[in-house]
Amino acid sequence: MEKMDRVVAKMVETPSPQRMQRFYSALKVTGIGEGLVVRDVGEGKGKGIFASKTFEEGDPVLIEPPLVAAQDTANKVDALVCAHCFQYVGSIELQIGRRLSLNQPQASGRPAETPEAETLDLDKRSGSEASDDEVTGSGQGTNGFGSREVTGSGQGTNGFGSREAIDKVNGLETELDEEGEHYCEVDESDDERIPAPPETVTALLDGTLKLPLSEQIPLPAVVECLGGCSENVYCSDTCASISWEAHHKLLCAGPRSEAADTEALRGFRDFADGSNNIFHAAAQVVAATVLRARKVGAPIIPEHLAGGVGIGSEGRGRRRSSRAVTGGRASEGGDEISDLDALLRAWEPFSMGWKGVWWESVACPPEMEGRPEEEAEFRASIRELCDGSLQLLRAAFGREAETYRPLFSLEVYSRIIGMFELNNLALVVQSPVENYFLAIDELSEDEKRKVEPVTKPLLDALGRSYSAHCEGTAFYMLQSCANHSCAPNARAFKREQDVNGHAVLLANRRIEVGEEVTISYIDESDSYIDRQRALADYGFVCRCLRCLTDSLND
Protein backbone atom coordinates (compact mmCIF):
# COMPACT_ATOMS: atom_id res chain seq x y z
CA MET A 1 0.00 0.00 0.00
CA GLU A 2 2.89 2.34 0.78
CA LYS A 3 4.25 1.82 -2.75
CA MET A 4 0.83 2.56 -4.24
CA ASP A 5 0.51 5.73 -2.17
CA ARG A 6 3.88 6.90 -3.45
CA VAL A 7 2.82 6.24 -7.04
CA VAL A 8 -0.46 8.14 -6.53
CA ALA A 9 1.51 11.06 -5.08
CA LYS A 10 3.84 11.06 -8.09
CA MET A 11 0.92 10.95 -10.51
CA VAL A 12 -0.76 14.02 -9.03
CA GLU A 13 2.36 16.09 -8.38
CA THR A 14 3.38 19.04 -10.55
CA PRO A 15 6.22 17.94 -12.85
CA SER A 16 9.64 19.42 -12.19
CA PRO A 17 10.98 21.99 -14.67
CA GLN A 18 13.44 19.34 -15.89
CA ARG A 19 10.68 16.81 -16.62
CA MET A 20 8.59 19.47 -18.29
CA GLN A 21 11.49 20.55 -20.50
CA ARG A 22 12.25 16.95 -21.48
CA PHE A 23 8.65 16.27 -22.42
CA TYR A 24 8.02 19.38 -24.50
CA SER A 25 11.39 19.01 -26.22
CA ALA A 26 10.33 15.51 -27.26
CA LEU A 27 6.96 16.83 -28.43
CA LYS A 28 8.71 19.40 -30.60
CA VAL A 29 10.45 16.60 -32.54
CA THR A 30 7.03 15.49 -33.83
CA GLY A 31 6.61 18.82 -35.63
CA ILE A 32 3.75 19.91 -33.37
CA GLY A 33 4.29 23.46 -32.20
CA GLU A 34 7.05 24.39 -34.61
CA GLY A 35 8.28 27.86 -33.72
CA LEU A 36 7.09 27.56 -30.11
CA VAL A 37 8.72 26.65 -26.81
CA VAL A 38 7.13 25.91 -23.45
CA ARG A 39 8.81 27.29 -20.34
CA ASP A 40 8.03 28.71 -16.95
CA VAL A 41 6.56 32.21 -17.13
CA GLY A 42 7.82 33.20 -13.70
CA GLU A 43 6.13 35.09 -10.88
CA GLY A 44 4.26 31.93 -9.89
CA LYS A 45 2.20 31.85 -13.10
CA GLY A 46 3.33 28.39 -14.16
CA LYS A 47 4.23 27.44 -17.71
CA GLY A 48 3.40 29.31 -20.90
CA ILE A 49 4.01 29.21 -24.65
CA PHE A 50 6.69 31.45 -26.15
CA ALA A 51 7.55 32.21 -29.77
CA SER A 52 10.93 30.96 -30.98
CA LYS A 53 10.36 32.58 -34.37
CA THR A 54 8.47 35.61 -35.65
CA PHE A 55 4.81 35.22 -36.58
CA GLU A 56 3.09 37.79 -38.76
CA GLU A 57 -0.54 38.81 -38.31
CA GLY A 58 -2.83 36.03 -39.55
CA ASP A 59 -0.13 33.35 -39.45
CA PRO A 60 -1.04 29.99 -37.91
CA VAL A 61 0.82 29.94 -34.60
CA LEU A 62 -0.30 26.46 -33.60
CA ILE A 63 -2.09 23.57 -35.31
CA GLU A 64 -2.37 20.70 -32.84
CA PRO A 65 -4.25 17.39 -32.77
CA PRO A 66 -5.87 16.49 -29.46
CA LEU A 67 -4.18 14.06 -27.10
CA VAL A 68 -7.64 12.73 -26.26
CA ALA A 69 -11.06 13.91 -27.42
CA ALA A 70 -14.66 12.73 -27.33
CA GLN A 71 -17.72 13.96 -29.19
CA ASP A 72 -20.66 14.93 -27.00
CA THR A 73 -23.20 12.11 -26.98
CA ALA A 74 -26.21 14.30 -27.77
CA ASN A 75 -24.28 15.90 -30.63
CA LYS A 76 -23.99 12.56 -32.45
CA VAL A 77 -27.53 13.12 -33.71
CA ASP A 78 -26.39 16.25 -35.55
CA ALA A 79 -22.92 15.18 -36.68
CA LEU A 80 -21.59 11.91 -38.05
CA VAL A 81 -17.84 12.37 -37.75
CA CYS A 82 -14.63 10.37 -37.59
CA ALA A 83 -14.13 9.39 -33.94
CA HIS A 84 -10.40 10.06 -34.27
CA CYS A 85 -9.89 13.23 -36.34
CA PHE A 86 -13.52 14.48 -36.18
CA GLN A 87 -13.82 15.16 -39.88
CA TYR A 88 -17.37 14.74 -41.19
CA VAL A 89 -17.91 11.50 -43.10
CA GLY A 90 -20.40 9.94 -45.51
CA SER A 91 -22.17 12.47 -47.71
CA ILE A 92 -24.29 15.59 -47.46
CA GLU A 93 -27.33 13.39 -48.07
CA LEU A 94 -26.42 11.05 -45.21
CA GLN A 95 -25.71 13.92 -42.81
CA ILE A 96 -29.09 15.53 -43.52
CA GLY A 97 -30.92 12.21 -43.52
CA ARG A 98 -29.51 11.23 -40.12
CA ARG A 99 -30.50 14.54 -38.55
CA LEU A 100 -34.02 14.23 -39.89
CA SER A 101 -34.45 10.58 -38.89
CA LEU A 102 -32.90 10.90 -35.43
CA ASN A 103 -34.38 14.27 -34.51
CA GLN A 104 -37.49 14.55 -36.68
CA PRO A 105 -40.35 16.58 -35.11
CA GLN A 106 -43.83 15.18 -35.35
CA ALA A 107 -46.93 17.29 -35.84
CA SER A 108 -46.89 17.98 -32.10
CA GLY A 109 -43.39 19.43 -32.39
CA ARG A 110 -41.87 16.60 -30.35
CA PRO A 111 -38.93 14.60 -31.66
CA ALA A 112 -39.75 11.29 -33.24
CA GLU A 113 -38.59 8.03 -31.74
CA THR A 114 -34.85 7.62 -32.18
CA PRO A 115 -34.03 4.52 -34.21
CA GLU A 116 -31.22 2.23 -33.14
CA ALA A 117 -27.89 3.18 -34.68
CA GLU A 118 -27.47 -0.36 -35.95
CA THR A 119 -30.39 0.08 -38.37
CA LEU A 120 -28.36 2.44 -40.55
CA ASP A 121 -26.52 0.41 -43.17
CA LEU A 122 -22.85 1.39 -43.15
CA ASP A 123 -22.45 0.12 -46.70
CA LYS A 124 -24.83 2.84 -47.85
CA ARG A 125 -23.12 5.63 -45.93
CA SER A 126 -20.43 6.30 -48.48
CA GLY A 127 -19.58 9.57 -50.05
CA SER A 128 -16.32 10.18 -51.87
CA GLU A 129 -13.66 7.52 -51.44
CA ALA A 130 -10.96 8.31 -48.91
CA SER A 131 -7.50 6.83 -48.97
CA ASP A 132 -5.42 6.27 -45.87
CA ASP A 133 -3.37 9.38 -46.49
CA GLU A 134 -6.45 11.60 -46.64
CA VAL A 135 -7.03 11.60 -42.90
CA THR A 136 -7.15 15.37 -42.58
CA GLY A 137 -9.32 15.64 -45.66
CA SER A 138 -10.31 18.61 -47.78
CA GLY A 139 -13.21 19.86 -49.76
CA GLN A 140 -15.32 21.22 -46.92
CA GLY A 141 -15.44 24.97 -47.44
CA THR A 142 -15.92 26.80 -44.18
CA ASN A 143 -16.13 30.48 -45.11
CA GLY A 144 -13.43 31.38 -42.61
CA PHE A 145 -15.25 29.55 -39.87
CA GLY A 146 -14.03 30.18 -36.35
CA SER A 147 -14.32 27.36 -33.87
CA ARG A 148 -15.51 27.40 -30.27
CA GLU A 149 -11.94 26.54 -29.35
CA VAL A 150 -10.77 29.25 -27.09
CA THR A 151 -9.80 28.46 -23.59
CA GLY A 152 -6.26 27.83 -22.51
CA SER A 153 -5.25 26.97 -18.98
CA GLY A 154 -8.73 27.79 -17.78
CA GLN A 155 -12.12 26.20 -17.99
CA GLY A 156 -13.33 25.80 -21.55
CA THR A 157 -16.54 24.26 -20.35
CA ASN A 158 -18.21 23.86 -17.06
CA GLY A 159 -17.57 20.16 -16.71
CA PHE A 160 -20.81 19.82 -14.81
CA GLY A 161 -23.00 21.97 -17.01
CA SER A 162 -23.22 23.58 -20.42
CA ARG A 163 -20.98 25.91 -22.36
CA GLU A 164 -21.99 29.47 -21.72
CA ALA A 165 -19.39 31.44 -23.65
CA ILE A 166 -20.81 33.63 -26.38
CA ASP A 167 -20.12 32.86 -30.01
CA LYS A 168 -17.61 35.64 -30.49
CA VAL A 169 -15.48 34.46 -27.59
CA ASN A 170 -15.50 30.99 -29.06
CA GLY A 171 -14.38 32.27 -32.45
CA LEU A 172 -17.71 31.22 -33.91
CA GLU A 173 -17.77 33.99 -36.47
CA THR A 174 -17.12 33.96 -40.19
CA GLU A 175 -15.45 36.54 -42.35
CA LEU A 176 -18.75 37.27 -44.06
CA ASP A 177 -20.67 37.40 -40.80
CA GLU A 178 -18.38 40.20 -39.67
CA GLU A 179 -19.60 42.23 -42.64
CA GLY A 180 -23.20 41.88 -41.53
CA GLU A 181 -24.37 39.26 -44.01
CA HIS A 182 -27.22 36.95 -43.01
CA TYR A 183 -27.80 33.53 -44.46
CA CYS A 184 -30.49 30.90 -44.76
CA GLU A 185 -33.43 32.32 -42.90
CA VAL A 186 -35.29 29.57 -41.08
CA ASP A 187 -38.09 29.41 -38.56
CA GLU A 188 -36.99 30.71 -35.16
CA SER A 189 -38.73 27.90 -33.31
CA ASP A 190 -38.03 24.22 -33.89
CA ASP A 191 -41.67 23.64 -32.91
CA GLU A 192 -42.62 25.24 -36.24
CA ARG A 193 -40.47 22.95 -38.36
CA ILE A 194 -42.26 21.12 -41.14
CA PRO A 195 -41.47 17.38 -40.98
CA ALA A 196 -39.84 15.94 -44.08
CA PRO A 197 -41.76 13.11 -45.80
CA PRO A 198 -40.57 9.71 -44.50
CA GLU A 199 -39.83 8.54 -48.04
CA THR A 200 -37.50 11.53 -48.53
CA VAL A 201 -35.61 10.72 -45.33
CA THR A 202 -35.28 7.09 -46.38
CA ALA A 203 -33.99 8.08 -49.82
CA LEU A 204 -31.39 10.36 -48.23
CA LEU A 205 -30.21 7.59 -45.93
CA ASP A 206 -29.98 4.85 -48.54
CA GLY A 207 -28.34 7.08 -51.16
CA THR A 208 -31.09 6.93 -53.78
CA LEU A 209 -31.72 10.69 -53.51
CA LYS A 210 -28.87 12.89 -54.71
CA LEU A 211 -29.15 16.55 -53.78
CA PRO A 212 -28.22 19.29 -56.25
CA LEU A 213 -24.65 20.57 -55.83
CA SER A 214 -23.85 18.05 -53.07
CA GLU A 215 -20.96 16.74 -55.15
CA GLN A 216 -19.23 20.08 -54.56
CA ILE A 217 -18.80 19.18 -50.88
CA PRO A 218 -17.41 15.62 -50.97
CA LEU A 219 -16.88 13.73 -47.73
CA PRO A 220 -14.75 10.64 -47.07
CA ALA A 221 -16.51 7.29 -46.96
CA VAL A 222 -17.57 5.84 -43.62
CA VAL A 223 -15.22 3.21 -42.16
CA GLU A 224 -16.41 0.84 -39.44
CA CYS A 225 -14.82 0.42 -36.02
CA LEU A 226 -12.30 -2.44 -35.91
CA GLY A 227 -14.14 -3.88 -32.94
CA GLY A 228 -17.50 -3.79 -34.68
CA CYS A 229 -19.23 -1.34 -32.35
CA SER A 230 -21.90 1.08 -33.55
CA GLU A 231 -20.61 3.95 -31.40
CA ASN A 232 -17.61 4.94 -33.51
CA VAL A 233 -17.06 5.40 -37.24
CA TYR A 234 -14.00 6.74 -39.04
CA CYS A 235 -12.93 8.55 -42.18
CA SER A 236 -10.21 6.04 -43.13
CA ASP A 237 -8.61 2.75 -42.16
CA THR A 238 -5.72 4.79 -40.77
CA CYS A 239 -7.87 6.72 -38.32
CA ALA A 240 -9.70 3.54 -37.30
CA SER A 241 -6.40 1.79 -36.58
CA ILE A 242 -4.88 4.73 -34.70
CA SER A 243 -7.92 5.09 -32.47
CA TRP A 244 -8.02 1.34 -31.83
CA GLU A 245 -4.39 1.15 -30.76
CA ALA A 246 -4.47 4.40 -28.77
CA HIS A 247 -7.44 3.61 -26.52
CA HIS A 248 -10.58 2.34 -28.25
CA LYS A 249 -9.77 -1.38 -28.09
CA LEU A 250 -10.40 -1.18 -24.32
CA LEU A 251 -13.47 1.06 -24.63
CA CYS A 252 -15.22 -0.68 -27.52
CA ALA A 253 -18.39 -2.62 -26.70
CA GLY A 254 -18.44 -4.41 -30.06
CA PRO A 255 -18.03 -8.16 -30.66
CA ARG A 256 -14.26 -7.86 -31.27
CA SER A 257 -13.55 -5.63 -28.28
CA GLU A 258 -10.57 -6.29 -26.01
CA ALA A 259 -12.39 -4.82 -23.00
CA ALA A 260 -12.34 -7.03 -19.92
CA ASP A 261 -16.10 -6.73 -19.35
CA THR A 262 -18.19 -5.27 -22.16
CA GLU A 263 -21.39 -5.38 -20.10
CA ALA A 264 -19.79 -3.28 -17.38
CA LEU A 265 -18.40 -1.02 -20.10
CA ARG A 266 -21.91 -0.47 -21.47
CA GLY A 267 -23.01 0.40 -17.96
CA PHE A 268 -20.24 2.99 -17.72
CA ARG A 269 -21.15 4.47 -21.10
CA ASP A 270 -24.83 4.67 -20.17
CA PHE A 271 -23.89 6.38 -16.91
CA ALA A 272 -21.71 8.91 -18.75
CA ASP A 273 -24.40 9.54 -21.37
CA GLY A 274 -26.96 10.22 -18.66
CA SER A 275 -24.79 12.33 -16.39
CA ASN A 276 -21.72 13.98 -17.92
CA ASN A 277 -19.90 13.57 -21.24
CA ILE A 278 -16.60 14.39 -19.58
CA PHE A 279 -16.46 10.81 -18.28
CA HIS A 280 -15.99 9.55 -21.86
CA ALA A 281 -12.88 11.69 -22.27
CA ALA A 282 -11.60 10.61 -18.85
CA ALA A 283 -12.04 6.96 -19.86
CA GLN A 284 -9.86 7.58 -22.91
CA VAL A 285 -7.09 8.86 -20.63
CA VAL A 286 -7.36 5.73 -18.48
CA ALA A 287 -7.43 3.35 -21.46
CA ALA A 288 -4.53 5.11 -23.20
CA THR A 289 -2.43 4.94 -20.03
CA VAL A 290 -3.15 1.23 -19.52
CA LEU A 291 -2.22 0.40 -23.11
CA ARG A 292 1.01 2.37 -22.86
CA ALA A 293 1.84 0.73 -19.52
CA ARG A 294 1.56 -2.70 -21.15
CA LYS A 295 4.72 -1.88 -23.10
CA VAL A 296 8.19 -1.80 -21.61
CA GLY A 297 9.61 1.69 -22.04
CA ALA A 298 6.58 3.25 -23.73
CA PRO A 299 7.51 6.34 -25.79
CA ILE A 300 7.22 9.63 -23.93
CA ILE A 301 5.13 11.01 -26.82
CA PRO A 302 2.13 8.83 -27.77
CA GLU A 303 2.62 7.25 -31.18
CA HIS A 304 -0.61 8.66 -32.64
CA LEU A 305 0.85 12.16 -32.19
CA ALA A 306 4.24 11.18 -33.57
CA GLY A 307 3.16 9.88 -36.95
CA GLY A 308 3.14 6.30 -35.68
CA VAL A 309 6.67 6.51 -34.25
CA GLY A 310 7.15 6.96 -30.51
CA ILE A 311 9.47 9.80 -29.53
CA GLY A 312 11.75 9.66 -26.52
CA SER A 313 11.36 5.95 -25.82
CA GLU A 314 13.57 3.77 -23.69
CA GLY A 315 13.68 0.34 -25.30
CA ARG A 316 10.49 1.41 -27.02
CA GLY A 317 7.62 -0.72 -28.14
CA ARG A 318 8.49 -4.05 -26.48
CA ARG A 319 5.29 -5.57 -25.17
CA ARG A 320 5.13 -6.75 -21.59
CA SER A 321 4.25 -10.34 -20.85
CA SER A 322 0.81 -11.40 -19.64
CA ARG A 323 2.43 -11.94 -16.26
CA ALA A 324 3.01 -8.21 -15.99
CA VAL A 325 -0.60 -7.42 -16.90
CA THR A 326 -1.82 -9.55 -14.02
CA GLY A 327 0.33 -7.78 -11.49
CA GLY A 328 3.74 -9.44 -11.62
CA ARG A 329 7.07 -8.27 -12.97
CA ALA A 330 8.16 -8.90 -16.53
CA SER A 331 11.57 -9.35 -18.07
CA GLU A 332 12.18 -9.14 -21.81
CA GLY A 333 15.55 -8.78 -23.44
CA GLY A 334 17.13 -8.24 -20.03
CA ASP A 335 14.79 -5.36 -19.12
CA GLU A 336 12.79 -5.66 -15.94
CA ILE A 337 10.16 -3.19 -14.86
CA SER A 338 7.37 -3.30 -12.30
CA ASP A 339 3.75 -2.61 -13.16
CA LEU A 340 3.71 0.60 -11.15
CA ASP A 341 6.94 1.89 -12.70
CA ALA A 342 5.47 1.16 -16.12
CA LEU A 343 2.35 3.05 -15.08
CA LEU A 344 4.36 6.13 -14.15
CA ARG A 345 6.13 6.12 -17.52
CA ALA A 346 2.84 5.66 -19.34
CA TRP A 347 1.27 8.52 -17.38
CA GLU A 348 3.92 11.06 -18.40
CA PRO A 349 1.95 12.85 -21.20
CA PHE A 350 -1.01 13.41 -18.88
CA SER A 351 1.19 14.48 -15.98
CA MET A 352 1.88 17.71 -17.86
CA GLY A 353 -1.70 18.96 -17.68
CA TRP A 354 -2.63 21.33 -14.88
CA LYS A 355 -4.88 19.38 -12.54
CA GLY A 356 -7.23 19.91 -9.67
CA VAL A 357 -9.74 17.72 -7.89
CA TRP A 358 -12.89 17.90 -10.01
CA TRP A 359 -15.39 18.81 -7.32
CA GLU A 360 -13.03 21.52 -6.07
CA SER A 361 -12.28 22.90 -9.55
CA VAL A 362 -15.78 23.15 -10.98
CA ALA A 363 -17.34 26.62 -10.83
CA CYS A 364 -20.12 26.92 -8.29
CA PRO A 365 -23.51 28.03 -9.69
CA PRO A 366 -23.99 31.80 -9.14
CA GLU A 367 -27.13 31.27 -7.07
CA MET A 368 -25.06 29.42 -4.46
CA GLU A 369 -22.67 32.29 -3.81
CA GLY A 370 -22.68 33.18 -0.14
CA ARG A 371 -24.47 29.94 0.74
CA PRO A 372 -21.72 27.64 2.04
CA GLU A 373 -24.04 24.79 3.01
CA GLU A 374 -25.57 24.64 -0.47
CA GLU A 375 -22.14 24.87 -2.08
CA ALA A 376 -20.85 22.03 0.10
CA GLU A 377 -23.84 19.90 -0.87
CA PHE A 378 -23.27 20.73 -4.55
CA ARG A 379 -19.61 19.70 -4.41
CA ALA A 380 -20.44 16.55 -2.46
CA SER A 381 -22.90 15.55 -5.19
CA ILE A 382 -20.17 15.98 -7.83
CA ARG A 383 -17.82 13.81 -5.77
CA GLU A 384 -20.51 11.14 -5.55
CA LEU A 385 -21.03 11.33 -9.31
CA CYS A 386 -17.29 10.99 -9.90
CA ASP A 387 -17.04 7.99 -7.59
CA GLY A 388 -20.03 6.30 -9.24
CA SER A 389 -18.40 6.69 -12.64
CA LEU A 390 -15.11 5.31 -11.35
CA GLN A 391 -16.72 2.21 -9.86
CA LEU A 392 -18.26 1.35 -13.22
CA LEU A 393 -14.98 1.98 -15.05
CA ARG A 394 -13.09 -0.26 -12.63
CA ALA A 395 -15.54 -3.07 -13.33
CA ALA A 396 -15.09 -2.61 -17.08
CA PHE A 397 -11.29 -2.99 -16.80
CA GLY A 398 -11.37 -6.09 -14.61
CA ARG A 399 -7.99 -7.31 -13.35
CA GLU A 400 -6.09 -4.40 -14.88
CA ALA A 401 -7.91 -2.05 -12.52
CA GLU A 402 -6.08 -3.91 -9.75
CA THR A 403 -2.79 -4.15 -11.63
CA TYR A 404 -2.72 -0.38 -12.16
CA ARG A 405 -4.59 0.47 -8.98
CA PRO A 406 -3.26 4.05 -8.61
CA LEU A 407 -4.75 4.98 -11.99
CA PHE A 408 -8.15 3.77 -10.77
CA SER A 409 -7.96 5.60 -7.44
CA LEU A 410 -10.39 8.43 -6.77
CA GLU A 411 -7.41 10.73 -6.12
CA VAL A 412 -6.11 10.28 -9.67
CA TYR A 413 -9.44 9.85 -11.48
CA SER A 414 -10.87 13.03 -9.96
CA ARG A 415 -7.82 14.91 -11.18
CA ILE A 416 -8.11 13.48 -14.68
CA ILE A 417 -11.57 15.03 -14.85
CA GLY A 418 -10.22 18.15 -13.15
CA MET A 419 -7.59 18.35 -15.88
CA PHE A 420 -10.35 18.66 -18.46
CA GLU A 421 -12.13 21.17 -16.26
CA LEU A 422 -9.07 23.39 -15.98
CA ASN A 423 -7.45 22.86 -19.39
CA ASN A 424 -10.32 21.97 -21.67
CA LEU A 425 -10.63 23.40 -25.14
CA ALA A 426 -14.08 22.78 -26.56
CA LEU A 427 -13.75 20.79 -29.76
CA VAL A 428 -15.90 22.19 -32.58
CA VAL A 429 -15.86 21.42 -36.30
CA GLN A 430 -18.15 23.31 -38.65
CA SER A 431 -20.79 21.24 -40.40
CA PRO A 432 -20.64 20.75 -44.17
CA VAL A 433 -24.47 20.78 -44.04
CA GLU A 434 -24.34 24.47 -43.16
CA ASN A 435 -21.86 25.04 -45.97
CA TYR A 436 -24.17 23.21 -48.37
CA PHE A 437 -27.16 25.44 -47.63
CA LEU A 438 -24.94 28.53 -47.75
CA ALA A 439 -23.80 27.43 -51.22
CA ILE A 440 -27.44 27.09 -52.29
CA ASP A 441 -28.18 30.52 -50.87
CA GLU A 442 -25.37 32.06 -52.94
CA LEU A 443 -26.78 30.81 -56.27
CA SER A 444 -28.35 33.21 -58.72
CA GLU A 445 -32.11 33.62 -58.44
CA ASP A 446 -32.68 31.54 -61.57
CA GLU A 447 -30.51 28.70 -60.26
CA LYS A 448 -32.21 28.87 -56.86
CA ARG A 449 -35.63 28.46 -58.39
CA LYS A 450 -34.47 25.22 -59.99
CA VAL A 451 -33.11 23.60 -56.82
CA GLU A 452 -35.24 25.03 -53.99
CA PRO A 453 -38.20 22.68 -54.59
CA VAL A 454 -35.80 19.98 -53.32
CA THR A 455 -33.64 21.88 -50.83
CA LYS A 456 -36.10 24.29 -49.20
CA PRO A 457 -38.31 21.57 -47.63
CA LEU A 458 -35.17 20.01 -46.13
CA LEU A 459 -34.03 23.34 -44.72
CA ASP A 460 -37.48 23.92 -43.24
CA ALA A 461 -37.46 20.44 -41.71
CA LEU A 462 -34.04 20.96 -40.16
CA GLY A 463 -34.94 24.36 -38.73
CA ARG A 464 -32.18 26.13 -36.88
CA SER A 465 -30.32 22.85 -36.44
CA TYR A 466 -29.18 23.09 -40.06
CA SER A 467 -26.09 24.91 -38.78
CA ALA A 468 -25.38 22.57 -35.83
CA HIS A 469 -21.67 21.75 -35.57
CA CYS A 470 -19.69 18.83 -34.22
CA GLU A 471 -19.02 19.52 -30.55
CA GLY A 472 -17.00 17.67 -27.96
CA THR A 473 -14.39 17.75 -25.23
CA ALA A 474 -10.66 17.64 -25.94
CA PHE A 475 -7.30 18.03 -24.27
CA TYR A 476 -4.43 19.58 -26.23
CA MET A 477 -0.96 19.39 -24.73
CA LEU A 478 0.41 22.65 -26.14
CA GLN A 479 -2.75 24.72 -26.36
CA SER A 480 -3.48 23.97 -22.72
CA CYS A 481 -0.27 25.85 -21.87
CA ALA A 482 -1.52 29.09 -23.44
CA ASN A 483 -2.18 31.72 -20.79
CA HIS A 484 -4.89 34.36 -20.80
CA SER A 485 -4.62 38.02 -21.71
CA CYS A 486 -7.37 40.59 -22.16
CA ALA A 487 -5.33 41.88 -25.10
CA PRO A 488 -4.24 38.54 -26.60
CA ASN A 489 -1.79 38.28 -29.47
CA ALA A 490 -3.43 35.06 -30.76
CA ARG A 491 -6.93 33.66 -31.15
CA ALA A 492 -8.63 30.35 -31.89
CA PHE A 493 -9.97 30.56 -35.43
CA LYS A 494 -10.44 27.90 -38.08
CA ARG A 495 -9.80 28.62 -41.72
CA GLU A 496 -11.37 26.94 -44.75
CA GLN A 497 -8.84 24.12 -44.71
CA ASP A 498 -9.31 23.38 -41.00
CA VAL A 499 -11.95 20.66 -41.28
CA ASN A 500 -11.00 18.41 -38.36
CA GLY A 501 -10.68 18.55 -34.58
CA HIS A 502 -7.22 20.12 -34.44
CA ALA A 503 -6.75 23.22 -32.33
CA VAL A 504 -5.79 26.21 -34.47
CA LEU A 505 -4.36 29.45 -33.11
CA LEU A 506 -3.80 32.43 -35.44
CA ALA A 507 -1.72 35.51 -34.71
CA ASN A 508 -3.76 38.66 -33.99
CA ARG A 509 -0.69 40.77 -34.72
CA ARG A 510 3.04 40.37 -35.25
CA ILE A 511 4.52 38.19 -32.51
CA GLU A 512 8.22 38.64 -31.90
CA VAL A 513 10.77 36.00 -30.91
CA GLY A 514 10.69 35.47 -27.14
CA GLU A 515 7.19 36.91 -26.74
CA GLU A 516 4.62 34.88 -24.83
CA VAL A 517 1.70 33.65 -26.95
CA THR A 518 -1.59 34.45 -25.20
CA ILE A 519 -5.27 33.91 -25.93
CA SER A 520 -8.43 35.19 -24.29
CA TYR A 521 -10.54 32.87 -22.17
CA ILE A 522 -13.43 35.34 -22.16
CA ASP A 523 -15.00 38.13 -24.21
CA GLU A 524 -12.24 40.73 -24.10
CA SER A 525 -14.66 43.44 -25.27
CA ASP A 526 -16.33 43.40 -21.84
CA SER A 527 -15.65 46.07 -19.25
CA TYR A 528 -12.86 45.64 -16.71
CA ILE A 529 -15.30 44.68 -13.94
CA ASP A 530 -17.15 42.16 -16.12
CA ARG A 531 -13.87 40.63 -17.31
CA GLN A 532 -12.62 40.18 -13.77
CA ARG A 533 -15.93 38.66 -12.73
CA ALA A 534 -15.80 36.18 -15.62
CA LEU A 535 -12.18 35.27 -14.91
CA ALA A 536 -12.95 34.56 -11.26
CA ASP A 537 -14.33 31.20 -12.42
CA TYR A 538 -10.85 30.38 -13.70
CA GLY A 539 -9.36 30.96 -10.27
CA PHE A 540 -7.17 34.00 -10.91
CA VAL A 541 -7.16 37.78 -11.05
CA CYS A 542 -5.94 39.08 -14.40
CA ARG A 543 -3.08 41.57 -14.13
CA CYS A 544 -2.32 42.00 -17.81
CA LEU A 545 -1.29 45.46 -18.99
CA ARG A 546 -4.80 46.25 -20.20
CA CYS A 547 -6.34 45.30 -16.85
CA LEU A 548 -3.79 47.32 -14.93
CA THR A 549 -4.59 50.33 -17.12
CA ASP A 550 -8.36 49.82 -16.93
CA SER A 551 -8.25 49.41 -13.15
CA LEU A 552 -6.89 52.93 -12.85
CA ASN A 553 -9.67 54.34 -15.02
CA ASP A 554 -12.65 52.46 -13.54
Image: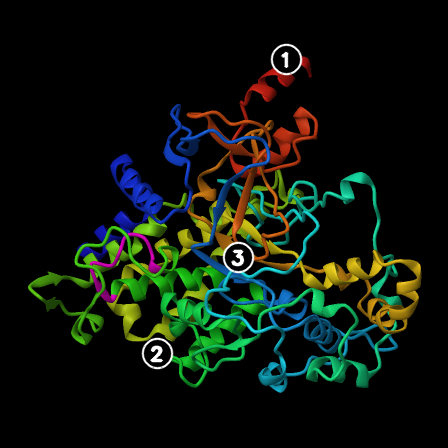
Residue 381 is situated, as x and y percent measured from the top left of the image, at 53, 57
Quarter of the image where the C terminus is located? top right
Q: Quadrant of residue 58?
A: top right
Residue 188 is inside the magenta segment: no
Measure how far apart labels 3 and 2 are at the Cα level. 29 Å
Residue at the spot 89% in from the left edge and 64% down from the top edge: 448
The amino acid pointed to by label 3 is: Ser
Q: Residues within 10 Å of mark 1 (few under 14, many from 20)?
A: few
The numbered mark, 3 or 1, whose residue comes first in the sequence reads 3
Segment tinted magenta in the rendering:
294-303
Q: Is residue 410 above or below residue 480?
A: below
Residue 340 in the figure: left or right of residue 548: left
The dominant secondary structure in magenta is: loop
Q: Is residue 511 above or below residue 89?
A: above
Residue tagged 3: 381
Quarter of the image where the N terminus is located? bottom left
Residue tagged 1: 552
The numbered mark, 2 or 1, whose residue comes first in the sequence reads 2
Residue tagged 2: 260
Residue 475 is situated, as x and y percent measured from the top left of the image, at 47, 52
Residue 458 vs residue 350, the one in the foreground: 458
Measure how far apart labels 2 and 1 are at the Cα level. 61 Å
The amino acid pointed to by label 2 is: Ala
Q: Residues within 10 Å of mark 3 (few under 14, many from 20)?
A: few
Residue 374 vs residue 496, the one in the foreground: 496
Q: Is residue 347 above or below residue 87?
A: above
Residue 260 is situated, as x and y percent measured from the top left of the image, at 34, 78
Residue 119 is situated, as x and y percent measured from the top left of the image, at 63, 86
Residue 301 is inside the magenta segment: yes
Residue 460 in the figure: left or right of residue 473: right
